Image (spheres, rainbow, N blue to C red):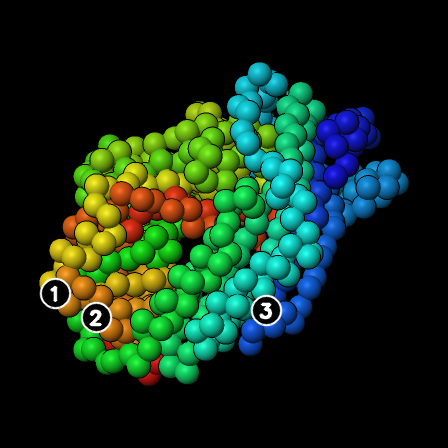
């Protein structure tokens, strides 16, 4: 890590170097390491240390961006010159008003860095894999997956006085357990390595693989379906990207366009973007240095807000909600810390109250067919079970589906009382962990369109 002082020196260097009307510097410095395993042994260890400096310059309404991964002063100066040259060839962006301003007192303190996580070593990852492999061997299963950790720092500064800096870290683990005709899956992500029990994770994946052995065929159709948090999180992720996105909202491409203030889904559902909550991957600011804060997106089924970065906010004469993803960003702002309020029933109660239905561990290869209507498709994977007379009776072969997320969330029968953090795999690219906190969800008449051969 280069530290806050050197990060500020880099920001000051760029600001002094450029002749632009406004300048922004984004610095991301990270160390990360990953251990992969397959067929019950470690087959890959990799580690990476890298720095990225992105420079955005503004001349009037012309904007240019360039980046480098060098901390050498000469390279940084060359990158400033490239950004300025690129800006000369850009069309004016009529929506641009200004880069954001923020004072030091505007930022909340969050617990994003943990010393024990940073000290989680290569040997520690190997011991974690050993625990997982031992469970696989005890159950005559094959195991596949990875254990990774990362520590990073982000600094965002601009010529208007905005300066934001923080350190953070995370650990991520995913485990597949496989028999000849079944699989089980589990994953976990956290900022604090002390909260991860690798043996327990492996036992959960093994139990799913054993329970789903010798899967049976069932006919496609409408079933009462219980989605464990890993599967349920995908409902939230697609809402985050396509419904709450301020740019798509302004362009009329969001389902929520024209619907703010209206009831859109079941009143038992409340969705909040809370970047300050310790239950998720808390973080104090966005990629423009705007302080983050809690924002209610859906309140008891009623659509309340979409999210903005500075560009989309100025277009509506509003303030940024702190959801910029960095520049250039043609997609728009997205909430990265989405939480769904829990319900009142345990997962076991939800199952026991189901006469006949399906229990889904997770989805595979989901894709949006209609981003505006929020229709998506995909298949189940790694633990799909038949529920009969209130009990999980057997594994079933995976099922394909095509459904509409809004319609699905209007057919809610129950939400579990223990939401879980479902982490997005942070192992590719620059290290920045994100995830959703979501309960299990029980849905009436979920439509499965076809069956698979496995």
Residue at image coords 28%, 57%: 227
Kindly indicate whether the residue at mark 2 contacts the one at mark 1 (C-beta within 8 angstroms): yes
Q: Which residue is labeled 3 in the image?
A: 37
Helix, strand or loop status at disc 3: strand
Kindly indicate whether the residue at mark 3 contacts the one at mark 2 (C-beta within 8 angstroms): no
Task: Tell how many labels.
Answer: 3
Quick one: label 2 or label 3, which is nearer the N terminus? 3
- Looking at the image, residue 170 sits to the left or right of residue 71; the answer is left
Relative to the observer, which residue lies in front, 273 or 370?
A: 273
C-alpha span from label 1 to label 2: 9 Å
Position of the N terminus, as image quadrant, is top right
Q: Which residue is labeled 1 in the image?
A: 389
Residue at image coords 39%, 30%: 295
Image: 395 above or below 52: below
Q: Position of residue 143 (x, y in %)?
A: 51, 71
C-alpha span from label 2 to label 3: 31 Å
Q: Position of residue 399 (x, y in %)?
A: 29, 73
Query: Residue 393, labelled with which disc?
Result: 2
Q: Position of residue 345 (x, y in %)?
A: 21, 45
Relative to the observer, which residue lies in front, 81 or 184?
A: 184
C-alpha span from label 3 to label 1: 39 Å
Residue at image coords 67%, 33%: 155
| Res. 287 image quadrant | top right
| Res. 65 image quadrant | top right
């Amino acid at each position: 890590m280069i530290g806050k002082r050197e990060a500020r020196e880099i920001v000051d260097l760029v600001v002094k170097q450029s002749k632009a009307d406004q300048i922004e510097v984004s610095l991301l410095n990270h160390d990360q390491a990953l251990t992969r395993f397959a067929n019950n042994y470690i087959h890959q260890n990799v580690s990476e240390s890298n720095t990225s400096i992105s420079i955005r310059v503004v001349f009037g309404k012309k904007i240019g961006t360039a980046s480098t991964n060098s901390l050498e002063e000469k390279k940084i100066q060359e990158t400033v010159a490239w950004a300025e040259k690129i800006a000369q060839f850009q069309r004016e962006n009529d929506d641009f008003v200004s880069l954001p301003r923020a004072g030091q007192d505007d930022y909340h303190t969050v617990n994003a860095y943990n010393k024990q996580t940073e000290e989680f070593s290569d040997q520690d990852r190997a011991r974690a894999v050993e625990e997982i492999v031992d469970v696989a061997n005890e159950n005559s299963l094959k195991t596949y997956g990875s254990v990774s950790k990362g520590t990073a720092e982000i600094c965002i500064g601009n010529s208007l006085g905005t300066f934001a800096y923080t350190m953070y870290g995370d650990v991520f683990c995913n485990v597949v357990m496989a028999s000849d005709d079944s699989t089980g899956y589990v994953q976990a992500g956290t900022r604090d390595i002390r909260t991860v029990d690798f043996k327990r994770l492996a036992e959960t994946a093994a139990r799913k693989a054993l329970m789903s052995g010798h899967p049976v065929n069932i006919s496609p159709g409408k079933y009462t379906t219980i989605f464990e948090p890993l599967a349920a999180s995908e409902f939230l992720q697609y809402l985050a990207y396509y419904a709450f996105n301020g740019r798509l909202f302004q362009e009329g491409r969001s389902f929520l366009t024209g619907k703010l203030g209206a009831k859109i889904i079941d009143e038992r559902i409340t969705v909040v973007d809370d970047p300050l909550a310790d239950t998720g991957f808390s973080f104090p600011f966005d990629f423009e240095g705007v302080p983050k804060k809690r924002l209610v997106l859906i309140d008891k089924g009623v659509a309340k807000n979409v999210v903005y970065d500075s560009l989309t906010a100025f277009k509506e004469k509003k303030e940024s909600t702190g959801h910029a993803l960095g520049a250039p960003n043609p997609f728009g702002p997205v909430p990265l810390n989405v939480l769904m309020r829990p319900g009142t029933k345990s997962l076991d109660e939800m199952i026991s109250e189901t006469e006949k239905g399906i229990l889904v561990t997770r989805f595979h290869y989901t894709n949006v067919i209609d981003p505006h209507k929020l229709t998506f498709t995909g298949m189940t994977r790694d633990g799909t079970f038949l529920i009969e007379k209130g009990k999980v009776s057997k594994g079933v072969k995976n099922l394909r589906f095509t459904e509409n997320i809004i319609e699905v969330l209007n057919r809610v029968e129950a939400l579990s009382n223990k939401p879980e953090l479902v982490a997005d795999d942070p192992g590719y690219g620059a290290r920045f962990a994100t995830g959703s906190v979501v309960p299990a969800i029980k849905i009436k008449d979920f439509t499965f369109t076809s069956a698979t051969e496995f």
